[in-house]
Image (cartoon, rainbow, N blue to C red):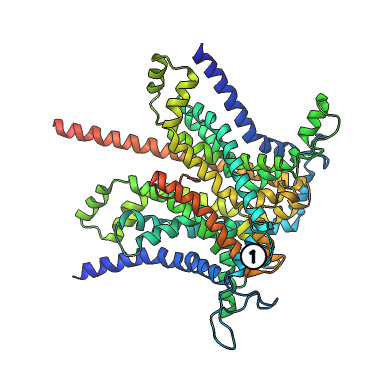
Amino acid sequence: MQSLFKRLTNRGFVIGVPYSWLLLFFLLPFFILLYISFVDMGSDIHPFKPIWDTETGILHLKYENYTSIFRNGEDGVMFQTLYVEAYIRSVWYALCTGVLCLLIGYPFAYFIARSAPSVRPALLMMVMLPFWTSFLLRVYAWKGILADQGVINKLLMAVGLTSEPIQMLYTNVSMLVGMTYVYLPFMVLPLYANLVKMDFRLLEAAYDLGASPFKAFWLVTVPLSKAGIIAGFMLVFIPCVGEFVIPSLLGGPENLMIGRVVWDEMFASNNWPRASALAVAMIGLIIVPLAIYYHYTGDAAPDAHKS
Amino acid sequence: MKVLIEKHFGKAWMALVYLFLYIPLFFMILFSFNSTRQDANFTGFSLRWYEALGKDSKIVEGFWLSLKVALATGLLSAVLGTFAAFVLVRYRRFTGRTIFSGMVNAPLVMPEVVIGLSLLLLMVGIQNAFGWPERGMLTIVLGHTLLGMAYAMVVIQSRLMEMNRSLEEAAMDLGARPFQVFFLVTLPNIAQAILAAFLLSFTLSFDDVVISEFLSGPGVSTLPQVIFGYARRGINPTIYSAATLLIVTVTVVIVGYSVWVARQTRRREREIAAAIRSETATLKI
C-alpha cells in the first residue's frame, strides 16, 4: 500500500515538473498572446487596454487587429496591405530556399549514402561541424564575401567578367544564398537517413530491366525517398518562414519578411495588439503545412532537427 | 562507364557542396589575421583584430554573459529534457499526455519571433504583478530553456527508447529501490545522450539572437546580440577573430566528444565480449 502511494507520488513528481514548466512558459504565454491580440492599443505606459470596458464592464473583442492585417481601413482593397505582402514574401522565399536546398542537398545526401560505410561518419561530421559553430557568424561572413568590394566581385573583375561590381549584397540573391547555406544541413540529414536505408539492388534491377539511369532514378530512387524529401523540406520551410536574422543582415529593404514586421510593430510602433495578432496569424501559417505533413506521415513532430 | 560518370560526378558534387559549407569559415579565419580592414585583399599577417577583440568591453562582457546564460540553459535543459523524455517514453498513459507531447514539441516548429514575443508578454505581465523579475539574464535563460528543453528531449528520448529495460528489471528484482534503479542503472545508460543534449542546448543558447533580443533588458546584451548590432552597421574584422576562436573551440569540443564516444563504445564492446567469453568458459566447466 505504502509502496503504491510512493510510486504514485514519484510518478506525479516526474510528470509534474516538466508539465508545470511547460504550462507556465509555453501555454500561458500563448494565451496571453492570444488575449492581447484581441484588445485595444493603449498608451506608452500601458501598451494595451483590458479586454473589458473599464466603466461598463462589458467585454469588447477588438477583431480589427486581425481584419486590418488583410485590409487597410474600411475602404481598402482586400489583401493589399504591407502585412499580406510580407506573409506572401516570407512563404515565397521559404519555398525557394526549400527547393534550392533540395536541388543541392539531394545529390549530396545520395552520394554520401552511396559512399563506403567507413567514410560515412566522417562525411556526416563534416556536414555537422559548421552547423555547431555560430549561425550568426556564418551568415555574417557572407556579408563580406558578397559585398561590392568583396571576394566574389573582386574575383569577377579580375577575371574580366564584369568591369564594375555587381550588387549582390542586400538583394534577394544574397538572402537566398544565406538561407540556403544555413538550412542545407536540415535538408541533408533527413535525406541521408532515408537514402542510406534504401536497397540499392532495386536500382540494379531497374538497370537490368532496361531503365536508363535517369528513368531508374526518377521511378525508383525518388519515390522511395519521398518521406525524406518531405521531412527535409518541412525542416527547411518552417524556420525559414519566420526567419529574422538572415533577412536583417543580408536582405535589402524591399525584402521585408514577416518576422521583421512583427518585431517592428512591437518595438518601433509599440503596437502590442497588432504585433500579437500578426504572431498568431504566423502560427496559422505554419500550422497548415504541418497539418499536411502529419497527415501524410502520421509521424510525431519532425524531430530530426539538430539531433 | 555509367558507374564511372556517377562516381566522378558524385565526387565533384560533394566537393562543391563541402566548399560551399566551409567557404565562410575559411574566409573568416583568413581575414581575422588581415592587417587592414579590407575584405577582399589580404594585405599582410597581423593579430591586431585579436587585440581589438580583447579590448572591446562590449564583446568581452557579452561573452561572459553568454557563457553564463548558455551554461544555465544547458543544465536546465538537460534536466528538464530528461524529465520530459522519461515521461514520454515511460508513462504511456496519463491525463493530458497529448497536450504534454504537443507542448514539448511545439517550440521546435514555432518561429522564434513568436516564442520571443509571447514570453516577453508573459514576463511583462509577471513583472507588473510582482515587480520581479527585471528583464535580463534570468529571463533570457528561461526563454532559451524553453527551446533547449525541446531539443534535449528529442536527443534523450531516442536513447531512452532503445535502452534495454531488462537491466532495470534485473536491478529491481535484486532489490533496488526506484531511485537507486534510476541513478545506478538508467542514468549511466543515458549519460551520453544527456551530455549531447547539454552540448546542443548550450550551443543553441550561445548562438541565439532572436529570443535574447526580445527578453533582454536595457544594458544587457549577450555576445550574439553585440555581434548582431555590429553586423547591421557594417563589416568589422574584430568579429572575424571572435569567429575564429569559436570555430577552433567547437572543432576541439566536437572532435573530443566523438573520440570519447568512440572509445566508450569500443570499451563497452570489449567488456561485452569478455563477459561472453567468461560465460562460455564457465559453461564448459
Disc 1 residue type (three-letter): Ser
Q: In this view, does A103 lie above or below A175?
A: above
Q: In this view, does A297 lie to the left or right of B247?
A: left
Q: Is residue A196 above or below residue B239?
A: above
- In the image shown, does B48 or A98 lie closer to the viewer? A98
Whether A145 is drawn above or below A70: the answer is: above
Identify the image quadrant of residue B11.
top right
Please state the horizontal and vertical placement of residue B244, each as a whole percent of the image: 68, 42
Q: Is residue B133 visible?
A: no
The single residue placed furthest to the bottom in the displayed view is A55
Q: Is mark 1 on a helix, strand or loop?
A: helix
Picture quarter with the N terminus of chain A = bottom left
Residue B124 makes an appearance in the image: yes
Pick the front one: A56 or B72: A56
Residue A182, x across and y down, in percent: 61, 42
Residue reaching furthest front? A75
Q: How many marks?
A: 1
Query: Of A134 and B61, which appears nearest the observer?
Result: A134
Host chain of mark 1: A
Relative placement, left or right, of B18 versus B83 is: right
Residue at the (56%, 81%) spot, across then down: A52
Q: How crowded is mark 1: few (under 14 residues within 10 Å), some or many (20 or more)?
A: some
- Per the image, the residue denoted by label 1 is A68
Q: Residue A95: x and y, percent?
A: 58, 43
Residue extending furthest toward the right: A163
Q: Is residue B50 above or below residue A203?
A: below
Give x and y (percent) for residue B52.
78, 50
Residue situated furthest top in the rendering: B1
